[in-house]
Each structure stands twice: as C-alpha cells, then as structure tokens.
Amino acid sequence: MDYVLMAFAMTGVVIPSFVKAPLLVLIFAIILQWLPAGGGMTGHSKTLYYQSPL
C-alpha cells in the first residue's frame, strides 16, 4: 500500500503543470461542470467590470 501511494504522489510531482492544468479543466469544468471553463464573470458583473473607469 505504501508503494501505491508513493507512486501516485510521484506521478503528481513529475507531470508538468501545463499537462495537469488542461486535464483538471477537462475533469472539473467539462465533465463534472462544477467550475466555469473560460472565466468566472458572466452577465451583469462582466458588463460592470468592462465599463468601470481605471
């Protein structure tokens, strides 16, 4: 059991972040639909953000 957990942990460390990130987006945004895939602002909050003065 210890070797299985160690292999799982090492796999997470060895895989680069540019490979992990799209996989996490695929899982959490597209398959599970828990998070937005393209940003968190929609509707009225997005309109207010782009119209506010800098």
Image: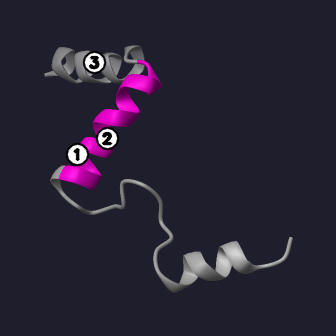
Decide: few, some or many residues near mark 3? Use Cα within 10 Å; few <14, some 14-19, many ≥20.
few
47 or 13: nearer the viewer? 47
Q: How far is disc 1 from disc 2 in space, using C-alphas?
A: 5 Å
Inspect the image, locate mark 1, and give the three-letter code of the amino acid beneath it: Ile
Span colored in magenta: 16-30
| Label disc, if present, on residue 27 of the rendered structure | 1
Inspect the image, locate mark 2, and give the three-letter code of the amino acid beneath it: Leu
**Residue 36 placed where, x, y %?**
36, 61
Q: Which element type, helix, strand or loop, lies under badge 2?
A: helix
Q: Does the residue at mark 1 contact the one at mark 2 (Cβ under 8 Å)?
A: yes
Q: Is residue 3 above or below residue 40?
A: above
**Residue 51 placed where, x, y %?**
72, 79
Q: Which quadrant, please, contains the N terminus? A: top left
Magenta-highlighted stretch: main secondary structure? helix
Which residue is tagged 2?
Answer: 24
**Residue 4 placed where, x, y %?**
16, 19
Q: Which element type, helix, strand or loop, lies under badge 3?
A: helix
Q: How far is disc 3 from disc 2 in space, using C-alphas?
A: 21 Å
| Label disc, if present, on residue 6 of the rendered structure | 3
**Residue 35 placed where, x, y %?**
34, 61
Q: Is residue 19 above or below residue 45?
A: above
Which residue shows up at 45% across the image and 26% down it? 17
Precedes in sequence: disc 3 or disc 1: 3
